[in-house]
């Protein structure tokens, strides 16, 4: 007698399983197929092309009525299964029971909805089935419609691109730092974001959703983010993940972990019940892509026919079905030992490829822009092929075995003709190329004809690269010292290219400038981080993980691993209240107390765990971080000046305090120290500071480029001014010029030696230039003039404690 | 092996580290840009620098005191420096970080 098979769920997985079953033995089972959706099997993957308008629903149906009829499948579509009664071996549907000999659970998964306030408003949907798709398509018909997608993974981005293709204004809100972080590294994520932004999609990464706002009639109106931004929308799509649909199986008493537990034969804890698809868990793994589900389908058919087959989970690869976004990702980047990277970047074509090797085998591959070789790599990876023989050229793919190495000049070659190479003299690449083609074959000749690299000289490296790119082998590049092993660029070229190409994130720098490592090293990361925050204070967010320990923890690490804490003492002035608070803090946290050479008080030997505590105490007394640890403004030393001293000509203390209050918190290429002395006796030692001001009867002598550390240098006069306000204006302009141009870890005196004091003076002599520099400095200070201690006490105090203490629980 | 849950992956900053106090001393738990997790001794064999405070790049960390670089996978010092830090098995389950109990000196609970 024919046995009865009941299938719950007509999805991608069960559809394939039935095909295999009928192909092998069409008459073995009488099949009843339940589906909660009011339709049969269709290709769920293809909902995205339906959404974007590239396909119709009819084109993605995989099994039609005729097929079900031919194979004698009793269809119960639009009917949800309510219960499984294993004792009686019946499945209870909404419209009645069906008995089974074998049962196949293929219920797929359920989209996870973040329980934000407002998640139950009308217009808040997931992206899973045809209904969701139609809802989004409907939105495209409304002119001026807006949508927000929460989730920058595969599904979220396909939803966003599909709606955008229908004219909807879409914003993607993603909690992580880059898109599709499960499949892509930062560099590929950056390129993807760039492509989506080019399609007019707004992308917000590192964004936390707080609440979904309604319009008063129960319909969604906007999404409110943690930072207070409101994103208006007519539809909000949540695509943040899926959960295996296990409710039926659980209620039936089957073994369920995160998914329905199955063995290698796809059999659950009940020998007559099988399961497959996204609802199952096999060897601790869950599934979210179809490739392994098709393997499961083959095994299910064999098991049902009492044949033996084993399901083996294999590597999966991902592609995003968004036109114009060519990406490929395969393998697991998250586990394993002894791995190495091979990275290839072609900034000109927007290509990025990265292979992860373990031993001599490929274990992961990410590529963007040129994915033609993806399947070749995927094949090598799946087969565990030894690639040591072709390692050197592997990244170029099968067609290029023996191909050329990456071009260190690609970034400059890719610049458009109107890219400004020399900022001082406003000379663009096209003009330089013209001069070279007209016969200027040397740096000097280019300088003479175009004036490029004729002033501060920091663009010299770039001009040489333009020469090399234009002349080819006829020009020999002088050897210049690159930032580190990750790039061939010098610091100066790097800075210039960041400005020129408006690179505003670390992945943008790595990609567009052809870095050879995935995310830099301890040498280049702090430099790149500084250049980005100095050039784009509002767009770029400081990255604490690219900072040395002192700057990350806002305290100086000591040789025994404890820290020193030094509050600011504006211009060296303090009062009894501050001193009492310092004394109490020292006592409470067992710190040694030292008066520093910078006119303030150092609390030494504080434990990392105690930092937030001591900061909070000092904050409570009105004190803020002294940045004694930073490449930034340190101290402004002052003398007692005209307030007290019989020789004092001006209020040196007051000016020092004003300067410190203006400059504090700013990050600079290296540390910056100031001093203001009330007369040429110079008790504040102003003549050996980065900026030193000596007050005289007629006004203020502003000197720059002093030092008293490893080198001792006297300041050189920048300018003499009459008023305190002018002294401050010149000082800030000078520091901003230094911030915008100097190489990371050059003190001002080293930088001035490179660009020449004459150039600095010439730039600053222009009142409009000074005003602009001051304006840019203030813009940056609108972000950075704040106490990092208070911020850390508030937002990240827990980071200063160990994540866990497992010494405590006694082991029995 | 018996695994102890030490926290959520997001408690460790990307390209950063946190400390775990264990019977064998402070162990640093690192998270790379690719969300891989490693555990290793916090103490640099050079002069005891706290490795959890170093810059994490690729699957390496640079000691904050004198810039020795260690592979987080093997524990070996890179380049010209010779030395090794102990590494401990860790793994991710869901979003939780688990560390091998025995290797950090904890007797398995009976
Ligand atoms: C605390 C203090 C010594 C003191 O007890 O007085 C000090 C302590 C340190 N100095 Fe200094 N310097 C201190 C005033 C100075 C001075 C004098 C001054 O500022 O008037 C100088 C010479 C002036 C100058 O900078 O030109 C000075 C020149 C240096 C240098 C050499 C800089 C150079 O460019 O040559 C370094 C090394 C560096 O920064 O790379 C340094 C580095 C350091 C570090 C941060 C070393 C480090 O990276 O760990 C020390 C931290 C000790 C700790 O564990 O907290 N310290 N250091 C002084 C803090 C002043 C303050 O209130 O902020
Ligand atoms: C828009 C979109 C794009 C995708 N793109 C890709 C891609 O490019 N590549 C890729 O590999 N994967 C992709 N996926 C994932 C892929 O579609 C799934 O992995 C696959 O569909 C899972 O198959 P399944 O049979 O397990 O579940 P499903 O296909 O979800 O089928 C389960 C069915 O069971 C029904 N059901 C659930 N409970 C009951 C019940 N109690 N009673 C009756 N019926 C019930 C459901 O209604 C559903 O129809 C995409 C998914 C979506 C939504
Ligand atoms: S620098 Fe001049 S004004 Fe200042 S304390 Fe010394 S002598 Fe007095
Ligand atoms: S203590 Fe680590 S490098 Fe010196």
Image (cartoon, coloured by chain):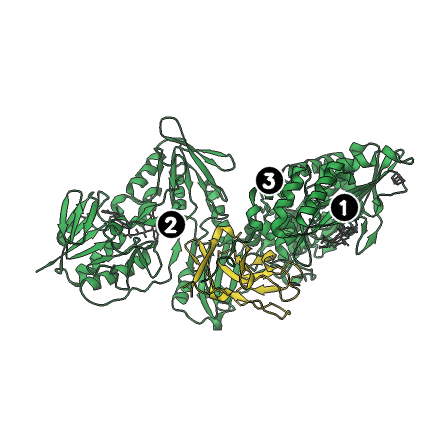
Picture coordinates of residue A206, whole percent (x, y) = 50, 44
Instruction: Indicate if the residue with disc 1 has its beta carbon within 8 Å of ligand 1.
Output: yes
- Using residue A772 as the reference point, say whether residue A246 is left or right of it: left
Going from N to C along the chain, the mark reached first, 1 or 2, is: 2
Q: Which mark is residue A673?
A: 1
The residue at which mark 2 appears reads as A321
- Using residue A37 as the reference point, say whether residue B53 is left or right of it: right
Task: Name the residue at the top extreme.
Answer: A216
The residue at which mark 3 appears reads as A538
Instruction: Indicate if the residue with disc 2 has its beta carbon within 8 Å of ligand 2.
Output: yes
- Neighbour class for label 3 at 10 Å: few (<14), some, many (≥20)? few
Going from N to C along the chain, the mark reached first, 3 or 2, is: 2
- Using residue A811 as the reference point, say whether residue A432 is left or right of it: right
Q: Which chain does the residue under circle 2 lie in?
A: A
Q: Hey, which quadrant is residue A87 in on the image?
A: bottom left
Disc 2 secondary structure class: loop
Q: Chain A is drawn in which colour?
A: green
- Using residue A533 as the reference point, say whether residue B101 is left or right of it: left
Q: Do badges 3 and 2 share one subunit? A: yes
Tell me, by letter, which chain the rendering colours yellow.
Answer: B
Q: Which chain does the residue under circle 1 lie in?
A: A
Q: Residue A5 carries which label?
A: none
In this orientation, which residue lies closer to the viewer: A12 or A267? Answer: A267
- Neighbour class for label 1 at 10 Å: few (<14), some, many (≥20)? many
Q: Can residue A805 be seen in this view?
A: yes
Q: Hey, which quadrant is residue A467 in on the image?
A: bottom right
Q: Tell me how far mark 3 sits from mark 2, CA to CA.
A: 33 Å
* Quadrant in which the N terminus of chain A is drawn: bottom left
- Name the mark nearer the viewer: 1 or 2: 1
Q: Can residue A497 be seen in this view?
A: no
Q: Is residue A794 above or below residue A108?
A: above
């Amino acid at each position: 007698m024919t046995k009865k098979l009941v299938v719950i769920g007509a999805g991608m997985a069960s559809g394939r399983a039935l095909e295999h079953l009928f192909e092998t033995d069409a008459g073995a089972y009488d099949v009843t197929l339940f589906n909660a959706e009011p339709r049969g099997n269709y290709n769920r993957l293809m909902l995205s092309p339906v959404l974007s308008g590239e396909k119709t629903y009819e084109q993605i149906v995989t099994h039609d009525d005729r097929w079900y009829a031919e194979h004698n499948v009793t269809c119960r579509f639009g009917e949800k299964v309510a219960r499984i009664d294993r004792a009686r071996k019946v499945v209870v549907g909404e419209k009645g029971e069906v008995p089974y000999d074998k049962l196949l659970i293929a219920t797929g998964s359920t989209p996870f909805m973040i329980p934000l306030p407002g998640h139950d408003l009308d217009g808040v949907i997931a992206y899973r089935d045809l209904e969701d798709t139609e809802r989004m398509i409907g939105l495209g018909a409304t002119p001026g419609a807006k949508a927000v997608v929460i989730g920058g993974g595969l599904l979220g981005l396909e939803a966003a691109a599909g709606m955008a293709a229908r004219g909807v204004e879409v914003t993607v809100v993603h909690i992580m730092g880059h898109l599709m972080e499960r499949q892509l590294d930062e560099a590929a994520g950056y390129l993807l974001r760039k492509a989506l932004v080019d399609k007019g999609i707004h992308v917000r990464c590192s964004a936390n959703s707080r609440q979904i706002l309604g319009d008063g009639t129960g319909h969604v109106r906007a999404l409110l983010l943690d930072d207070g931004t409101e994103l208006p929308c007519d539809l909000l799509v949540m695509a943040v993940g899926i959960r295996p649909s296990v409710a039926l199986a659980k209620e039936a008493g089957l073994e369920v972990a995160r998914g329905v537990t199955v063995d290698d034969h796809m059999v659950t804890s009940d020998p007559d019940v099988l399961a497959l698809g996204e609802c199952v868990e096999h060897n601790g793994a869950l599934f979210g892509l179809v490739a392994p589900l098709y393997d499961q389908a083959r095994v299910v058919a064999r098991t049902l026919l009492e044949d033996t087959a084993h399901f083996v989970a294999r590597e999966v690869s991902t592609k995003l079905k968004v036109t114009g976004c060519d990406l490929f990702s395969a393998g697991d980047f998250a586990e394993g030992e002894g791995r190495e990277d091979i990275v290839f970047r072609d900034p000109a074509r927007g290509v990025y490829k990265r292979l992860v090797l373990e031993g001599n085998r490929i274990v992961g591959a990410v590529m963007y822009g040129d994915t033609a070789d993806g399947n070749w790599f995927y094949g090598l990876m799946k087969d565990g092929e030894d690639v040591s023989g072709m390692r050197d050229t592997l990244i170029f793919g099968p067609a290029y075995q023996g191909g050329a190495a990456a071009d260190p000049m690609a970034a400059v070659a890719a610049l458009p003709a109107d890219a400004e190479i020399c900022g001082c003299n406003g000379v663009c690449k096209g003009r330089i190329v013209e001069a070279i083609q007209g016969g200027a074959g040397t740096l000097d000749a280019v300088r003479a004809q175009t004036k490029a690299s004729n002033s501060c000289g920091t663009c010299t490296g770039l001009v040489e690269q333009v020469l090399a790119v234009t002349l080819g082998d006829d020009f020999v590049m002088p050897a210049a010292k690159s930032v580190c092993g990750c790039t061939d660029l010098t610091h100066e070229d790097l800075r210039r290219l960041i400005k020129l190409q408006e690179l505003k994130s670390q992945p943008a720098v790595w990609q567009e400038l052809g870095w050879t490592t995935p995310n830099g090293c301890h040498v280049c990361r702090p430099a790149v981080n500084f250049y980005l925050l100095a050039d784009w204070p509002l767009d770029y967010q400081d990255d604490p993980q690219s900072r040395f320990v002192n700057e990350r923890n806002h305290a100086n690490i000591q040789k025994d691993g404890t820290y020193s804490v030094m509050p600011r003492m504006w211009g060296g002035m303090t009062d009894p209240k501050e001193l009492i608070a310092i004394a109490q803090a020292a006592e409470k946290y067992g710190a040694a107390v030292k008066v520093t050479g910078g006119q303030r008080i150092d609390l030494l030997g504080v434990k990392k765990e105690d930092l937030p505590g001591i900061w909070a105490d000092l904050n409570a007394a009105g004190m803020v971080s002294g940045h004694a640890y930073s490449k930034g403004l340190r101290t402004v030393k002052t003398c007692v000046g005209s307030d007290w001293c019989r020789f004092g000509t001006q209020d040196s203390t007051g000016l020092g305090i004003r300067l410190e209050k203006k400059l504090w918190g700013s990050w600079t290429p290296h540390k910056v120290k100031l001093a203001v002395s009330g007369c040429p006796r110079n008790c504040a030692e102003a003549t050996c500071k980065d900026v030193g001001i000596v007050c005289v009867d007629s006004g203020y002598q502003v000197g720059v480029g002093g030092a008293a550390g490893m080198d001792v240098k006297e300041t050189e006069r920048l300018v003499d001014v009459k008023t305190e306000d002018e002294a401050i204006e010149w000082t800030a302009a000078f520091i901003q010029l230094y911030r915008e141009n100097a190489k990371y870890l050059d003190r001002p005196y080293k930088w001035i030696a490179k660009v020449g004091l004459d150039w600095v003076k010439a730039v600053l002599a222009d009142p409009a230039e000074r005003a602009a520099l001051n304006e840019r400095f203030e813009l940056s200070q609108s972000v950075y003039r704040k106490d990092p201690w208070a911020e850390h006490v508030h937002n990240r105090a827990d980071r200063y404690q160990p994540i866990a203490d497992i010494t405590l629980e006694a082991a029995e | 092996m018996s695994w102890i849950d030490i926290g959520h992956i997001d408690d460790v900053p990307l390209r950063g580290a946190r400390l775990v106090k264990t019977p064998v001393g402070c162990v640093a738990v690192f998270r790379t840009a690719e969300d891989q997790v490693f555990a290793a001794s916090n103490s640099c064999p050079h002069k005891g620098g706290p490795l959890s405070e170093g810059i994490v790049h690729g699957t390496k960390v640079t000691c904050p005191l004198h810039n020795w670089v260690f592979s987080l996978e093997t524990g070996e010092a890179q380049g010209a420096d010779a030395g090794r830090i102990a590494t401990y098995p860790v793994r991710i389950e869901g979003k939780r970080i688990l560390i091998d109990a025995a290797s950090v000196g904890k007797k398995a609970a009976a």
